[in-house]
Each structure stands twice: as C-alpha cells, then as structure tokens.
Image: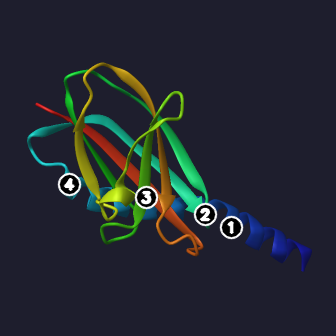
C-alpha cells in the first residue's frame, strides 16, 4: 500500500507542473491576440501560477520615448487579471483596475525607467490561475 501511495504521489508531482505549463501556454496564445503587427515582442513571456490571492511580481525596464504595450491575461476571456506598474520606489504608475481591467494598455515614458509589475487574479476566490504578461514595443 505504501508503494501505491508513493507511486501516486510521484506521478502527481510530475504531472501537475506539466498541466500548469499547458494551461499557461493556452493563455499565452489567447493573450497574443492583443499584440498587433505594429508592435514587436520583447521576446519574453512573463508567467506565474497564482494560488488564491497571491501576487506575482516581474521586473522590466522601459526606455524613454518608446511606445509600449502590455497585455495581461488569465483564463480564456479578457479582464481576468489585475496589473499594477510601479517605479522602483513603489509609486503606482498604472493599474488596469482603473480602466475596467483592460487586457492591454499602451503607454510611453519620457525617460528610461526600471519598473515592477504586479499581477493578481481578479477573482481572489479562485483556487488557481496562470498569469501571463506580454510586453511589446511599437515599431
């Protein structure tokens, strides 16, 4: 019986990360619809598996006089992820919750800036969800 439970535990330990990765892949593909041809990806996908009310934190540098687009997705429909962008002193620069949880936003800084981006599931009662952020810049 111990061998069965060990085998079951081992199987679950190996499968759960793969299932979470597949969920994030699907959400990333949904999120790409917000990246139009006029924007070039920074080449990264910012991902986090969030449980309950957890908050993911990502770092990014934005260069002055460049127009950026951030797309934020969780789940298969828009508006399921709250994002907040802070400067390094934790001054809030933007939150999509002020804009009906818009799934993407275009912005431009006058000078280069290192930022902290937080992502949180809109439904804090959700058991889990994958947060995906995509960042691109205008050609």
Tell which of 17 and 115 is nearer to you. 115
Q: Nearer the viewer, mark 2 or mark 1?
A: 2
Q: Looking at the rendering, which quadrant does residue 112 occupy?
A: top left
- First in sequence: mark 3 vs mark 1: 1
Q: Residues within 10 Å of mark 2 (few under 14, many from 20)?
A: some
The quadrant the N terminus occupies is bottom right
Check disc 4 and report its element: helix, strand or loop: helix
Residue at 54% from the left image edge and 49% from the top image edge: 56
In x, y percent, where is residue 91?
A: 49, 35
Q: Are marks 2 and 1 in contact (CB under 8 Å)?
A: no
Residue, disc 1: 11
Q: CA distance from mark 3 to mark 1?
A: 33 Å
In x, y percent, where is residue 25?
A: 38, 58
- First in sequence: mark 2 vs mark 1: 1
Q: Nearer the viewer, mark 3 or mark 4?
A: 3
In the drawing, what numbered circle is on residue 53? 2
Residue, disc 3: 82
Q: Is residue 24 left or right of residue 50?
A: left
Check disc 1 and report its element: helix, strand or loop: helix
In x, y percent, where is residue 138?
A: 14, 34
Q: Residues within 10 Å of mark 4 (few under 14, many from 20)?
A: some
Q: Residues within 10 Å of mark 1 (few under 14, many from 20)?
A: few
Residue, disc 4: 34
Q: Nearer the viewer, mark 4 or mark 1?
A: 4
Q: Is residue 105 left or right of residue 23?
A: left
């Amino acid at each position: 019986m111990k061998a069965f439970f060990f085998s079951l535990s081992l199987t679950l330990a190996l499968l759960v990360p793969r299932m979470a990765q597949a969920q994030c892949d699907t959400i990333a593909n949904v999120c790409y619809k917000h990246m139009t041809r006029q924007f070039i990806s920074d080449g990264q996908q910012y991902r986090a598996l969030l449980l309950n009310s957890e908050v993911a934190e990502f770092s990014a540098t934005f260069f002055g006089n460049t127009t950026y687009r951030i797309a934020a997705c969780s789940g298969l429909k828009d508006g399921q992820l709250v994002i907040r962008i802070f400067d390094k002193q934790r001054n809030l620069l933007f939150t999509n919750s002020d804009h009906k949880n818009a799934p993407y936003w275009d912005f431009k800084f006058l000078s280069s800036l290192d930022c902290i981006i937080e992502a949180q599931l809109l439904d804090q009662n959700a058991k889990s969800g994958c947060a995906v952020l995509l960042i691109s810049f205008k050609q």
